[in-house]
Amino acid sequence: QVQLVESGGGLVQAGGSLRLSCAASGSIFKINDMGWYRQAPGKQRELVASIDKNLRTNYTDSVKGRFTISRDNTKNTVYLQMSSLNPDDQAVYYCNADIVTMLSLRARPYWGQGTQVTVSS
């Protein structure tokens, strides 16, 4: 069994910063790509940023220069440092990881439970 547990969401004023964390635990053999998605009310879930096992990163255009994704492979944890937040960033943020487990030895995506980010103007 694999779990992704997120933390770090909350309320922040426009222009402020937040750092999200997501730790994977369980019968993990290896983790490939990790990423952060977000979903605002009435909108589709969108990819915000991703990072592969070699630390190559990818960002959606709207967060480039403001958000930074990183990971600690020794802790099976991915982070999202968010700066210069604006009301358009308000959403539930979900952690995602492509994980190979000890049981299956086949990669599949796992999701966190989501953490709310609220930006006040």
Image (cartoon, helix red, strand yellow):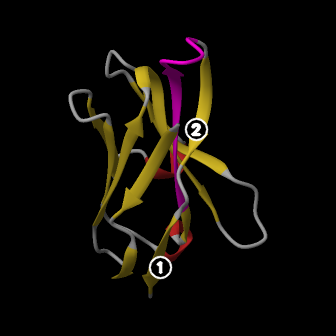
For residue 84, say whether it is visible.
yes
Q: Nearer the viewer, residue 59 or 80?
A: 80
Tell me, yes or no, whether the two marked residues, 1 and 2, touch with CB atoms within 8 Å. no
Residue sitting at 55 percent across and 11 percent down? 105
- Position above or below: 10 against 67: below
Q: Amino acid at mark 2?
A: Tyr
Classed neighbour count for the residue bearing mark 2: other residues with Cα under 10 Å, few (<14), some (14–19), many (≥20): some
Residue sitting at 60 percent across and 13 percent down? 106
* Residue 32 in picture, x, y percent from top left: 46, 20
**View extreme (top): residue:** 105
Q: Is residue 68 magenta?
A: no
Q: Amino acid at mark 1?
A: Thr
Q: Nearer the viewer, residue 80 or 101?
A: 101
**View extreme (bottom): residue:** 121
What range of the chain is rendered magenta? 93-105
Type of secondary structure dominating the magenta stretch: strand
- Position above or below: 88 against 78: below
Q: Secondary structure at mark 2?
A: strand
* Residue 73 in picture, x, y percent from top left: 26, 27
Q: On the rendered structure, is 52 left or right of 94?
A: left
* Residue 62 in picture, x, y percent from top left: 52, 51
* Residue 76 in picture, x, y percent from top left: 31, 34
Q: Which label belongs to residue 34?
A: none
Query: Is label 1 or label 2 in front?
Result: 2
Residue occupied by mark 1? 118
Q: Which label belongs to residue 110?
A: 2
> Could you give the CA–CA distance between mark 1 and mark 2, rounded to whole angstroms?
24 Å
Residue sitting at 58 percent across and 38 percent down? 110
